[in-house]
Image (cartoon, grey):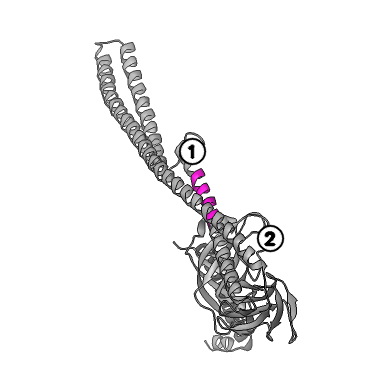
């Protein structure tokens, strides 16, 4: 006993015990590290499943060009990029003794306006007729779906009835085979007659199996029809479906043309109003900021003496901070997980990790430059094939993104879309 105690208290035994404890500690740490890796991977996969992440993104905004309304001498007040302007704030003036060309320009613009308004009426009527056809074809498509499901149900009922008949025939055949088997043992009938009865029972059993398999196939077809699928061959669209798709595409194109014409009409009305104002003033046109915005760039710096300028020449560009959005480039394979109005989070990549809530307002795709129909601070990039450009409207901007920072326009961001429906 004393020897055992001496051995246990020996330094060698204590060293071995400490080594075993360290090994157990390291083993526990390794298990904890592996568990952390697995948990992190699971969390990452869950995030990828529940969310859609943009490849790249940036903040964008609407630029309004301020043009010279009349020819004359431009005197522009001192302006600096990043300077905040209030709506209606005067930033310069154009002086001109007279401008006989204005009346001719007004008449030309009114003629163009009348043509654009007639074009809009034609497009609106065309859209109404296409929408009526879409409603009719949608009814036909629903009827076709109902009839396909009804046809599959009737076929299923027919096979079910045949299966029941086959099962009844199998029951009779088995009874007949059992009866002839007993009669063979008694010597009342020949062995050949009993073999025929047994064979008939096996044939009836095979018929039942075939009908059961056929019943399962028809059940699968019925389920496929209910989901709009076709299993017997490649899925083909019916005439109503094909025509409906064509009409929907046509309506989208018509709406794009209507938007373009309405933008033209709005621009023409604005130009006509400007010319009327210029005709009333004749000798003096004050340059004012049309919105509350930020000076983006000054195209002509006139100085105190002024410079000659022609009507329609650009003077300055103003950024509309009330219309700032995020544009995100997303892989086209995520198109099914994106929709208009979808919640999104815009994360600034300036090191602050600030996050801005928003929602999807537009989705566009296609290779090459995209004409967006408006002046933007950051032109759209060259979209690669199989890539979407998603515009995200922002609920509010952080106070840090003020006028001196051009409301954050041009900053890189990451957009995270909530894919949970």
Relative placement, left or right, of 175 versus 316 is left
Relative to the observer, which residue lies in front, 224 or 237?
237
Q: Residues within 10 Å of mark 2 (few under 14, many from 20)?
A: few
- In front: label 2 or label 1: 2
What percent of the width, then of the height, locates residue 30? Answer: 59, 74
Residues under numbered marks 2 and 1 in contact, where contact means CB atoms less than 8 Å apart: no
Q: Secondary structure at mark 1?
A: loop
Q: Is residue 72 above or below residue 106?
A: below
Q: Residues within 10 Å of mark 1 (few under 14, many from 20)?
A: few
Relative to the observer, which residue lies in front, 267 or 26?
267
Q: Main secondary structure of the magenta part?
A: helix
Relative placement, left or right, of 33 versus 173 is right
Q: Quadrant of residue 276?
A: bottom right
Magenta stretch: includes residue 280: no
Relative to the observer, which residue lies in front, 4 or 376?
376
Residue marked by disc 2? 382
What percent of the width, then of the height, locates residue 221? Answer: 41, 37
- Residue 20, can we see it? no
Check residue 237 in the rendering and tell me which mark sits there, or answer none: 1
Q: Along the polypeptide, which appears first: circle 2 or circle 1?
A: 1
Q: Secondary structure at mark 2?
A: loop
Relative placement, left or right, of 247 versus 350 is left
Q: CA distance from mark 2 to mark 1?
A: 34 Å
User: Which residues lie in the magenta part?
Assistant: 246-258
Q: Quadrant of residue 98?
A: bottom right
Check residue 329 in the rendering and tell me which mark sits there, or answer none: none
Q: How many marks?
A: 2
Q: Is residue 23 above or below residue 101?
A: below
Residue shown at 52%/51% (left/top)?
A: 254
What percent of the width, then of the height, locates residue 409? Answer: 62, 75
Quarter holding the C terminus is bottom left
Magenta stretch: includes residue 249: yes
């Amino acid at each position: 006993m004393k020897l055992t105690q001496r051995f246990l208290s020996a330094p060698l035994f204590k060293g071995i015990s400490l080594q075993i404890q360290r090994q157990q500690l390291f083993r526990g740490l390794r298990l904890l590290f592996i568990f952390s890796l697995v948990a992190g991977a699971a969390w990452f996969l869950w995030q990828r499943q529940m969310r859609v992440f943009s490849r790249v993104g940036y903040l964008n905004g609407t630029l309004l060009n301020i043009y010279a309304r009349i020819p004359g001498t431009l005197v522009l007040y001192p302006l600096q990029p990043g300077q905040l302007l209030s709506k209606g704030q005067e930033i310069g003036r154009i002086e001109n003794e007279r401008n006989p060309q204005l009346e001719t320009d007004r008449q030309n613009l009114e003629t163009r306006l009348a043509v654009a308004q007639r074009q809009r009426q034609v497009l609106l009527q065309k859209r109404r007729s296409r929408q009526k056809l879409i409603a009719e074809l949608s009814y036909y498509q629903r009827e076709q779906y109902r009839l396909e499901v009804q046809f599959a149900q009737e076929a299923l009922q027919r096979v079910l009835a045949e299966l029941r008949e086959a099962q009844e025939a199998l029951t009779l055949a088995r009874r007949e085979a059992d009866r002839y088997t007993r009669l063979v043992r008694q010597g009342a009938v020949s062995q050949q007659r009993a073999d025929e009865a047994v064979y008939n029972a096996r044939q009836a059993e095979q018929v039942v199996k075939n009908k059961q398999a056929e019943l399962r196939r028809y059940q699968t077809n019925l389920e496929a029809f209910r989901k709009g699928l076709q299993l017997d061959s490649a899925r083909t669209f019916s005439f109503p479906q094909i025509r409906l798709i064509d009409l929907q595409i046509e309506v989208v194109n018509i709406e794009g043309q209507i938007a373009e014409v309405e933008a033209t009409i709005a621009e023409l009305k604005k130009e006509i109003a400007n010319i009327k104002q210029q005709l009333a003033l004749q000798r003096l046109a004050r340059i004012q900021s049309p919105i509350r915005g930020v000076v983006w760039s000054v195209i002509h710096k006139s100085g105190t003496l002024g410079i000659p300028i022609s009507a329609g020449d650009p003077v300055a560009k103003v950024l509309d901070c009330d219309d700032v959005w995020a544009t995100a480039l997303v892989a086209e394979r995520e198109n099914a997980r994106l929709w208009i109005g979808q919640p999104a989070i815009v994360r600034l990549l300036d090191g602050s990790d600030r996050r801005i809530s928003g929602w999807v307002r537009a989705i566009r795709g296609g290779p090459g430059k995209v004409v967006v129909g408006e002046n933007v601070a950051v032109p759209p990039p060259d979209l690669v094939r199989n890539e979407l450009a998603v515009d995200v409207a922002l609920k509010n901007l952080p106070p840090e993104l003020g006028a001196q920072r051009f409301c954050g326009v041009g900053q890189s961001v990451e957009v995270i879309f909530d894919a949970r429906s």
